[in-house]
Image: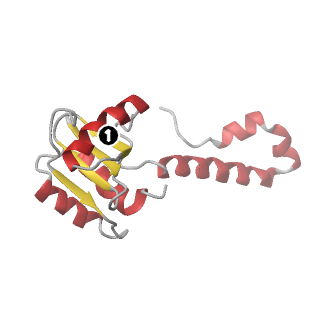
Amino acid sequence: MGSAFLPISFFNKWLPSLNTAWPHCKLPFIFLSILIFLSTNAIATPCDKIDHRLNEQRKVELGTVISQQLQVTNIDVLQSFKLDAWSIILVDTHESDEAFLFYSGDPKTNHYITLWSGSAKIDEEQNINNWLITNAHDIPVDLANCFAWYVTKGRNM
């Protein structure tokens, strides 16, 4: 079984000049390998499992349907979060704050079931999840966790 850390034997085998000339130089290499391992794991977010694909054609299609649903003339589809049949679409109507619309089916054939707009503080992730349980019944847990994380911590990433 492999390890994410490079063993000391790696440095002994591949860096023999460091062993003889500067044996104390192994420590920075060990520290660097630990740092790389930790930083790659620290980048993971609750949104990693969520489909964010949104090409220009899909933006136009969704924009047309959503502008009718919201009864506005101009809309920009900014982002999409999709898991299973559920979608959360972030839109800018140019008339109010950006809004997240929640769909339990295809937005082109289903009306949004709720919307969320505004800001959230970094410590309100659980409050957002509670709001989702009340207002977006049966939303997949991973999608709910992604949304709660995104609006509290991930928007500026």
Left or right: 13 in relation to 155: right
SS class, disc 1 = helix
Residue under pointer 1: 63
Q: Amino acid at mark 1?
A: Gly
What residue lies at 30% left-to-right and 55% top-to-bottom? Answer: 99
Left or right: 60 in relation to 29: left
Determine whether 21 is above or below 60 in the image: below
What residue lies at 37% left-to-right and 36% top-to-bottom? Answer: 59
Image coords of residue 65 (percent x, y): 24, 38
The answer to which of 68 and 87 lies nearer the viewer is 68
Image coords of residue 9 (percent x, y): 67, 38
Q: What count of labels does the image hold?
A: 1
What residue lies at 86% left-to-right and 40% top-to-bottom? Answer: 17
Q: Quadrant of residue 24?
A: bottom right
The answer to which of 69 and 121 lies nearer the viewer is 69
Determine whether 120 is above or below 148 in the image: below
* Label 1 crowd bin: few (<14), some (14–19), many (20+), radius 10 Å: many
